[in-house]
Amino acid sequence: MIKGFGFAKLLFTFLGFDVTRRRTYMDAKKTIRKAKLSGKSICEYVEDLWDIKGNTDAIIQQIKQTGALEHCNEVCEIGPGTGRYLERILKEVRPSYYHIYEIDKDWANWLQKTYKPFVIAHPADGHSLSATPDNHCGLVCAHGVFVYLPFLTAFEYFSEMVRVCSPGGVIVFDIYSDKCWDKEVINKWLNHSERYPVILPEYRVIEFFEDKGCQIIGRFNARHGHSYSTYLVFKK
């Protein structure tokens, strides 16, 4: 998802960066109010605002085709933001618990209140999943988070995702892959004001997970920002 809205803004502030992310940060209270006034769900409101109608469902269906949503008694998501994907996964999986790590407290509180008793909002420190035990969750995911995090912070989270994922469980996330950023994509982004993209070496990301006992079982591209991100799906 273009997601992790408050998570992104607060994390970059904490790290001392001044980043323009007009399409990716949304104030929780204002967004919830505007969506309600428009008679739309949060997902519908955001998709209409960004002209990406149907994008959330399309991504969930792609993930579903990999078998990632088959056995998920507990789920853990990093930076759920508005909860667009959380809402869809809850409908598909019906887990006992859905653990979230969202730095923006307004979004975290709203998600926990809206989707109780399933959603549990844990304290988020911007680099770990410290409240979740080892080998605990059948699905560990993030949407639109690793497209902006600093390189080493992303890999800190990758290690944590492997740690909390149960044996046989699945890890799903998207990145801006170096394989996809050709001259056309670069020039397209240069024509806009956002400067948040962090490009990760796809080969090294896959190698990192394989070294930790995970096998890649799926890969696909999805609309994100002014181009698209690459989803990687691993089985532990």
Image: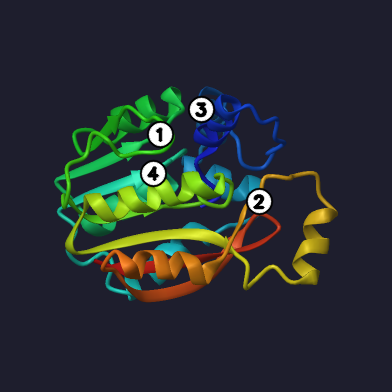
Q: Is residue 72 above or below residue 42?
A: below
**Residue 191 place in picture, x, y as percent:** 85, 54
Q: Residue at x 27, y 73 (%)?
A: 67
Q: Pointers 3 and 4 in contact (CB under 8 A)?
A: no
Q: Amino acid at mark 2?
A: Pro
Q: The disc labelled 4 sits on which kind of residue? A: Ile
Residue 45 lies left or right of residue 59; in this view the side is right
Cβ–Cβ below 8 Å for labels 1 and 2?
A: no
The percent coordinates of residue 98 (x first, y second) are: 24, 43
Query: Based on the displayed image, in which of its 4 quarters is residue 100 positioned?
Result: top left
Q: Residue 14 location, x and y as percent?
A: 55, 25
Left or right of 178, for residue 86: left
How busy is the neighbourhood of tag 2: few (under 14 within 10 Å), some, or many (20 plus)? some
**Disc 2 target residue:** 197
Mark 1 or 2: in front is 2
The residue indicated by pointer 1 is: 102
Q: How far apart, in angstroms, are the residues tagged by discs 4 and 1?
A: 7 Å
Q: Which residue is mark 3?
A: 28
Which residue corresponds to mark 4?
Answer: 78
Q: Which is more foreground, mark 3 or mark 4?
A: 4
Disc on the earlier residue, 1 or 2: 1
Q: Nearer the viewer, mark 2 or mark 3?
A: 2
Which is more N-terminal, label 4 or label 2? Answer: 4
**Counting residues from the N terminus, which is met first, the one under dot 3 or under dot 4?**
3
Q: Residue at x 54, y 27 (%)?
A: 10
The correct choice, above or below, for 130 with respect to 160 in the image is above
Can I make out residue 145 in this image? no
Check disc 4 and report its element: helix, strand or loop. strand
Amino acid residing under circle 1: Glu
Q: CA distance from mark 2 to mark 3?
A: 22 Å
